[in-house]
Structure formats: structure tokens, C-alpha cells
């Protein structure tokens, strides 16, 4: 069944979720819950079939972890990055470093925002991000 849309309606209205490939779902869920402090949401699978995914709400977009090996894919990292909006990059970086997270480089100041880049438990790129310049 096809839905009709008005020509003036933008094709993309927003982002509902981002899919993050993982190799070990339990390890990834622990990282996003215990290390990043995100509240776990729904999971996919379990009970009668293998657990294949888990969701985390961030307030602006859902992060959906997917065990790609359980749905016929093969795991690899480096396909993209998720910028996580934080209130204070250096303070949050210090908290994560105290929890054992290793950052890939010094914090970057782009003259628009601060960014600190680190891997999640599966090697996917995450960025602590704080935009301090007003949007034009």
C-alpha cells in the first residue's frame, strides 16, 4: 500500500534511531548502561529466540544496539560515529577515563564545539560533544 505525500513535505523529518553494530550484546549493553549511564529500553528477542538487540533513549534519538551476527551479518567497526550531547566535555571525559575508557586523542575545540572521541566496548566511535557557539 502506498502513502501519498504532499510535494512540499520534506523527505526526512528527523532521526528516529541510529543502529550500532555490536559483536557481544551483553558486553555492549553493560557499557551503555554502566559506563555511559544510559537507561536501558526495550530489547528484541529473548525467551523463544536469541536476543538480537537493545535500545537506549537519549532524549533526542534512540541508540539501537544490534548483534549483527545473529541476523546474518558480519561485525565490523568504523562505519560511523555518534556524537553524544553532554553538558561539560572535560568533566564527562574525566568520569569516563576514571571508569577505564581510553580516548583516541586530546579534546578538540573546533571554535564551534568541544569534542572528545572514544570507542565503545565494541570499537564503535562515540564522541562527547558540546556545541557552545550559537547556531546561525
Image (cartoon, grey):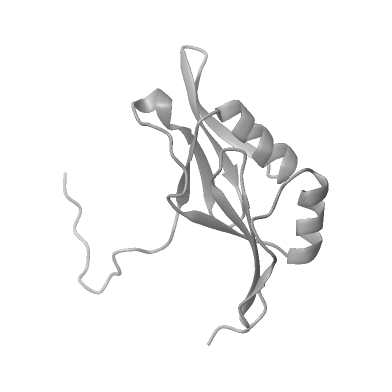
At 47% across and 17% down in the image, what residue appears?
A: 50
Rendering coords of residue 70 (x, y %):
41, 24
**For this view, does 60 lie left or right of residue 67?**
right
Residue 81 makes an appearance in the image: yes
Rendering coords of residue 6 (x, y %):
22, 68
Along the viewing direction, whichever of 97 and 82 lies nearer the viewer: 97
At 81% across and 62% down in the image, what residue appears?
A: 91
Quarter of the image where the N terminus is located: top left
| Direction left: furthest residue | 1
Q: Write down the quadrant of residue 110 in the picture.
A: bottom right
At 16% across and 49% down in the image, what residue appears?
A: 2
**For this view, does 85 lie left or right of residue 66?**
right
Q: Write down the quadrant of residue 120 in the picture.
A: top right
Rendering coords of residue 8 (x, y %):
25, 74
Along the viewing direction, whichever of 41 and 28 lies nearer the viewer: 28
At 30% across and 69% down in the image, what residue appears?
A: 10
**For this view, does 22 lie left or right of residue 7?**
right
| Direction front: furthest residue | 105
Q: How many marks?
A: 0
| Direction bottom: furthest residue | 136
**For this view, does 72 lie left or right of residue 40?**
left
Amino acid at each position: 500500500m502506498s502513502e501519498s505525500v504532499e510535494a512540499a513535505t520534506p523527505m526526512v523529518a528527523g532521526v528516529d534511531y541510529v543502529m550500532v553494530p555490536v559483536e557481544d550484546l551483553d558486553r555492549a549493553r553493560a557499557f551503555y548502561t554502566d559506563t555511559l549511564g544510559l537507561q536501558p529500553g526495550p530489547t528484541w528477542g529473548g525467551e523463544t529466540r536469541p536476543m538480537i538487540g537493545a535500545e537506549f533513549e537519549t532524549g533526542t534519538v534512540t541508540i539501537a544496539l544490534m548483534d549483527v551476527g545473529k541476523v546474518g551479518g558480519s561485525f565490523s567497526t568504523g562505519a560511523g560515529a555518534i556524537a553524544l550531547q553532554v553538558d561539560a566535555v572535560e568533566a564527562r571525559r574525566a568520569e569516563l577515563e576514571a571508569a577505564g575508557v581510553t580516548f583516541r586523542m586530546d579534546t578538540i575545540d573546533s571554535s564551534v564545539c568541544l569534542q572528545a572521541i572514544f570507542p565503545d566496548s565494541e570499537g564503535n566511535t562515540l564522541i562527547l560533544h558540546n556545541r557552545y557557539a550559537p547556531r546561525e
